[in-house]
Amino acid sequence: MIPTNYTEWRHCIEIDCGITLTPAFAEERLKILQAKNEPYVIGFIKMYGQPYTNQVISWFKYFLQEQN
C-alpha cells in the first residue's frame, strides 16, 4: 500500500518497515530525495512519479518541523 497522507506514511516507516524515524534519518532521506541525478531518486520518480516524490519530501520536512 502506498501511503496517501502523513499518518499512513509515518505508520509505514515506523510500524510496517520497523524504522525509527529520527531527525537524522529524515535529514538523510531528504538529502537523497532532493539529489535529482542520483540513480535511487531517478528510480523512485519512475516508480512513483514526481508528484508523489514531492509529497514524500514534504512529509519528511513536516516531521522535522514537528521535532522543533
Image: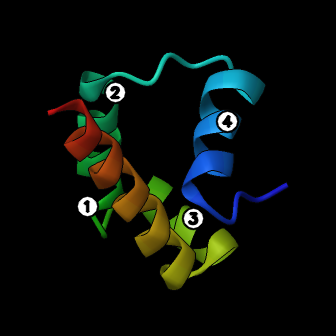
Q: Nearer the viewer, residue 2 or 7?
A: 7
Q: For the residues marked 4 and 1, what is the alpha-carbon distance in whole angstroms?
A: 25 Å
Disc number lying in front (4 or 3): 4
Q: Which of the marked residues, 1 or 3, is nearer the chain's N terminus?
A: 1
The residue at 50%/16% (across/down) is: 20
Q: For the residues marked 4 and 3, what is the alpha-carbon distance in whole angstroms?
A: 23 Å
Q: Quadrant of the C terminus?
A: top left
Disc 1 target residue: 35
Disc 2 target residue: 25
Q: Looking at the image, do the residues carrying marks 4 and 1 touch, with CB atoms under 8 Å apart?
A: no
Disc number lying in front (4 or 2): 4
Residue 61 image position (x, y, % from top left): 28, 53
Disc 3 target residue: 43
Classed neighbour count for the residue bearing mark 3: other residues with Cα under 10 Å, few (<14), some (14–19), many (≥20): few
Classed neighbour count for the residue bearing mark 4: other residues with Cα under 10 Å, few (<14), some (14–19), many (≥20): some
The residue at 57%/64% (across/down) is: 43
Numbered mark located on residue 56 in the image: none
